[in-house]
Structures are given as structure tokens and as C-alpha cells.
Image: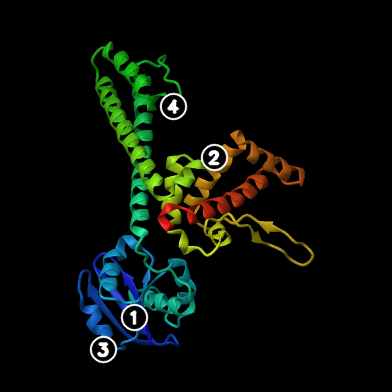
Amino acid sequence: MIVIGLDVHKQTVTAVAVDEAGRPLAEMTIQVGSDELLAWAAELDEERLWAVEDCRQLTRWLERQLLGLGEDLVRVPPRLTVPERRAGRTRGKSDPIDALAIARAALREPDLGRPRPDEQRYREIKLLVDHRDDLVDQRRRTQQRLRWHLFQLDPTYVVPLRMLGRASHLERVSRWLARRAPALPLRLARELVSNCRSLNRTIAELDRELEQRVNKTAPGLLELPGCAAVTAAKLLAEVGPIDRFKSDAQLARHSGVAPVEASSGRTQRHRLDRSGNRQLNAALYRIAITQARYHPAARDYLERKRAEGKSRRDAIRCLKRLLVRVVFNTLKASPALT
């Protein structure tokens, strides 16, 4: 059997084939969209495994092409290729070097992820969540510019914090602007008010669509205290199909919630894990902070941890680890898997 590592770019795809010992056999570079790879690989060996660097915005077309032809394919996370590049005899960086590192990483790691037929729904949720995040950032920048124009028009006019996200207060600002004398800052402020209204409507529509998709995919997440539709959608977008993970401990490590042992000699201790999926980690943190304020069971849990001598930060981290187990079990029991 051979393993073919693929380094995919916007214009080209570089393939390097290695044997079971990791020795390079052949390499090839094609243009994106070409179907020459299969004929080239068929001449090398009938039994083959394709290894693609996990960058799905670039590799999705190639994955569809290979899977449509019945080929066996795995995804290699970019971090796994770093040790292979460092251990290689050829120094530097090039597309063949990267493709060789991908192939050798696929040989070294037996449990790499593979494309799943149900991952499309999670990809669509992630696209919506990312689009909403971009719109929220755009709205924040628009509101900041509007505040500066309002200050230029009248430094005594005060807009309370977070009020520009409400339609009622935008209407109040619009009426105030209508009473002002014509000026360039006035015209720009009116345009920004219109932009804020448009962004508010678009974000609200996305929130409703995300809630509908969460209800279809994992309604149990919405029953979790502190987890509203947007946070639940973020969890689904970052976790993906839950069968990727064999246990809640593996999911905790993926999200950077599991502590890392940092013992030495007689000192036995653990430290915070700063790796992992930070978007997923942030979503768990938002749930934990909300529960710490309003959920009685979570507050009792935090008090017990504080009584054990842990700081509030350490107690919140323990709560996040507990939440990972709850999220894991909830997704395992979701209608998408039953």
C-alpha cells in the first residue's frame, strides 16, 4: 500500500507518494480542477490512501472528486505535519516537502479523521455563525463611527452604552438628527444610522435561522442553562459530528478545557491548557459564566470547589470541564444521531 500526501493551493495541487516505510516514490503537480491524479496514482499501486491537509476551504473540491471515485481519504491536521518537516532530510519549505510531511504524518497517525456524510449540516451552521460574527463586528465598527459623528455635531449629546443596537434608540437618534442644521457629519451620521438598522435586521434574521437549525440538529443544547441559540450554534459549528470524539475527555482536550500535567520531582500539579479550539473554549466559558450568575446547581458546584481551596478561576475551569461532559452526552443523544 502507498500513501499519497496532497498539498493543495488555490492554483495547484502537489502530490507525493510514499511506501509503508515513508520512503518517497514519486511526486506530481497538477492544476486545480484537473483529474490527472487518479491516472498517475493508478500506475503506482492499486491499494492507496490519500492524505489531505485539513484545510477544507481549499480541499473540498478535491475531496468530492476522490470520494466520488471510491478512493480512501483521511484529513491530516496541519499541526501534525510540523514534526515531519523538522525531521526531514531536506531543509526549507516547498510544496513537495509539505506533501511529503502530510503523507508521513498519515502513516504515523492511525486514527485520523475522515469525511462524513452528515458533516454538511454542521458546515452550513459554521458558515452562518462565521457570517454572523463578521456582521456583528461590522455593526460594532459602524456604531463607533456613528458615536464620533454625533460627538462632532454636539459634544453634550449622550448615547447610552449598547443602545445603538435597539431600533427604538436608533429612531430617537434619527429624529434628533432631523432637527439639526445640514452639514457633512450630519449626512454621514444619517447613513450610519441606516446601516445600523440594516445590520440589526440581518443579524436578527440570522439568529432566527440559527435557532431553527439548532432545533433540528441538537435541541437538547437549548435546554442547557446559559446556552442560547447563538452559543448552541457555535458549539455545533466547532464540534461538528460528535462521533469524531470517542469520549468527553477527547472533546475536552480538543477544546482546551482539560488541564495539562506539569509535575516535576515531588511537585505534582497541573496547568492551564492554552491550546485547543479557542472558539469552542470561549463558548463554554460564556455558558459557565452565565450559570455561575443565575443557575443554582452551578453556583453550588462552584462553592464546593472554592471550599476545596480552589480560586474562582480554577473553579470556573472545573465547571467548564463538567460542561464538556454535558455537551458531549447531549450531542450523543441528539436526533441527528438517532
Q: Which mark is residue 43?
A: 3
**Residue at disc 3, secondary structure:** loop
Q: Which mark is residue 225?
A: 2
Measured Cα–Cα span from mark 1 to mark 2: 49 Å
Residue 28 % position (x, y): 27, 80
Q: Locate the N terminus by quadrant.
A: bottom left
Judging depth in this view, the residue of 107 and 245 nearest the camera is 245
Which residue position holds label 1?
A: 16
Q: Residue furthest right?
A: 266
When asked about the image quadrant of residue 38, the answer is bottom left
Q: Which mark is residue 209?
A: none
Measured Cα–Cα span from mark 4 to mark 1: 54 Å
Q: Which mark is residue 162?
A: 4
Q: Residue at x 76, y 46 (%)?
A: 309
Which of the two labelled residues, at mark 2 and mark 4, occupies the earlier sequence position? 4
Residue 32 % position (x, y): 22, 69
Q: Are marks 1 and 2 in contact (CB under 8 Å)?
A: no
- Horizontally, residue 247 falls left or right of residue 58, namely right
Q: Is residue 163 above or below residue 285?
A: above
Which of the two labelled residues, at mark 4 and mark 1, occupies the earlier sequence position? 1
**Residue at disc 2, secondary structure:** loop
